[in-house]
Image: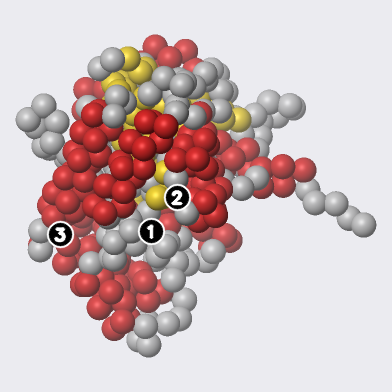
């Protein structure tokens, strides 16, 4: 019998899929995997109804021109530098294949990302034949922050790229323009690519009285930054798998050339629908409403968790909140308390994880959040 390639060692079930499966099995409220429990906006669904039946064949690998234009417009960028992918996950895969890999002999290129880290970056680096290197974010009483020294010391002569995820999953941290300037400066000094995973770019909340959009990394290093975005995150439709990459000037055709060997093109009718919906969302106040409604749920969850004794690290963006309670074990909370969360240890690859910290997704209904808080109170009272 032939055997599978050793790289299938990377095929373990993802923590998100596992927690969702366990949540269903144990009847737990699922504040684990980050997908909205509400429906996408009606204007997106209506656009899709119109597109199915009229836009049914392949698009060019680089993407439908109306969508490239809508994305370019929404990012204040030239649409010729935009390509469309099957979600941001495929965008990250195609960039991994485009930017790093094995080197001569036993050496491998290295790619750095902040830890805690979203789960796809390390396996995608491995699939590309490169090595993943984590640079820990700092966590103290004031919450999460960038540790520039940790980032600087993670750079070696083999480093090819830094992945900057802001707003950051799982912490909700948004890097300031000042911090991004430091990262851009490091990248210039060492001649590195920058991959900006900005899928949560429209999800930012009021903090310390301010409420301004995250600074885009490309504004600080346009010549070396690839910006990744996601229709699923912007439009509450994570299963649609429509994402995009904004490349440095002139590089979109080369990256699209690799994307043609992975999925060829993203689903054509969904590209057409997203193109219409991005234009509509820019003019109809949809993102303001998204922020208002998720912001309200975040504050409710934060105050509920604080009342139960958790130390809450308030997120500046995303739809995730991290909170600490000494001795808290996420697996036990799921099976015995009926509340599914993601233990923060699942987001660490190379750096030590802080104990007792959980990630809660608050892109869920108010009823689910209230029920989760009730169950947590009962669980904590009983243990
Ligand atoms: N982005 C989502 C999260 O962080 C889920 C990703 C996935 O399940 N592939 O929870």
The alpha-carbon separation of the residues under discs 3 and 2 comes to 31 Å
The alpha-carbon separation of the residues under discs 2 and 1 comes to 21 Å
Work out whether mark 2 precedes mark 1 in sequence or the reverse, and give the earlier one: 2
Q: Name the element at disc 3.
A: helix
Q: Which residue is the site of mark 1?
A: 238
Furthest residue in direction bottom, as rendered? 53
Furthest residue in direction left, as rendered? 209
Q: Which residue is the site of mark 3?
A: 286
Work out whether mark 1 precedes mark 3 in sequence or the reverse, and give the earlier one: 1
The quarter of the rendered structure image containing the N terminus is: bottom right
- Point out the frontmost of discs 2 and 1: 2
Q: For the point 52% across and 42% down, which residue is it?
A: 335
Asked if residue 337 is positioned above or below residue 220 in the image, the reply reads: below
**Does any atom of ligand 1 lie closer than 8 Å to the CB of label 1?**
yes
Residues at marks 1 and 3 touching, judged by CB atoms closer than 8 Å: no
Foreground pick, 79 / 200: 200
The quarter of the rendered structure image containing the C terminus is: top left
Q: Name the element at disc 1.
A: loop
* Position of residue 313 measured from the top left corner of the image (x, y, whole percent): 28, 26
Residues at marks 2 and 1 touching, judged by CB atoms closer than 8 Å: no
- Point out the frontmost of discs 3 and 2: 2
Task: Give the colour scheme shown.
Answer: secondary structure
Q: For the point 54% across and 64% down, which residue is it?
A: 263
Estimate how packed mark 2 is, as few (under 14), some (14 to 19) or many (20 or more) residues with alpha carbons within 10 Å.
many
Foreground pick, 12 / 127: 12
The alpha-carbon separation of the residues under discs 1 and 3 comes to 17 Å
Estimate how packed mark 3 is, as few (under 14), some (14 to 19) or many (20 or more) residues with alpha carbons within 10 Å.
some
Q: Along the horizontal axis of the image, is 335 left or right of 204?
A: right
């Amino acid at each position: 019998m032939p055997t599978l390639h050793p790289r299938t060692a990377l095929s373990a079930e993802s923590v998100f899929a596992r927690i969702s499966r366990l949540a269903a099995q144990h009847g737990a409220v699922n504040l684990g995997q980050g997908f909205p429990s509400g429906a996408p906006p009606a204007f997106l669904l209506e656009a899709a109804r119109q597109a199915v039946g009229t836009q049914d064949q392949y698009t060019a690998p680089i993407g439908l021109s109306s969508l490239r234009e809508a994305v370019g417009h929404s990012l204040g960028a030239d649409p010729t530098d935009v390509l469309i992918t099957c979600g941001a996950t495929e965008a990250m895969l195609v960039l991994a294949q485009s930017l790093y890999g094995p080197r001569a002999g036993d050496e491998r290129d290295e790619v750095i990302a902040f830890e805690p880290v979203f789960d796809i970056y390390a396996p995608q680096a491995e699939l590309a034949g490169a090595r993943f290197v984590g640079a820990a974010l700092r966590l103290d009483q004031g919450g999460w922050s960038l540790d520039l020294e940790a980032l600087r010391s993670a750079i070696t002569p083999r480093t090819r790229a830094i992945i900057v995820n802001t707003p950051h999953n799982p912490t909700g941290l948004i890097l300031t323009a000042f911090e991004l300037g430091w990262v851009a400066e490091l990248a210039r000094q060492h001649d590195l690519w920058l991959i900006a995973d900005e899928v949560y770019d429209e999800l930012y909340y009021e903090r310390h009285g301010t409420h301004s959009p995250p600074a885009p990394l490309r504004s600080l290093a346009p010549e070396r930054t690839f910006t990744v975005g996601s229709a699923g995150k912007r439009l509450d439709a994570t299963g649609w798998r429509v994402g995009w990459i904004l490349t440095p000037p002139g590089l979109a055709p080369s990256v699209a050339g690799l994307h043609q060997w992975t999925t060829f093109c993203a689903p054509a009718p969904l590209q057409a629908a997203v193109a219409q919906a991005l234009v509509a969302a820019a003019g109809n106040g949809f993102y303001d409403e998204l922020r208002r409604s998720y912001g309200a749920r975040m504050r409710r969850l934060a105050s509920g968790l604080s009342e139960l004794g958790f130390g809450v690290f308030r997120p500046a963006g995303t739809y995730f909140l991290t909170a600490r309670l000494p001795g808290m074990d996420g697996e036990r909370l799921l099976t015995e308390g009926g509340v599914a969360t993601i233990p923060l240890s699942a987001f660490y690859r190379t750096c030590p994880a802080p104990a007792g910290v959980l990630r809660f997704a608050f892109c869920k209904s108010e009823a689910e959040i209230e029920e989760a808080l009730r169950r947590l109170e009962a669980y904590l009272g009983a243990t």
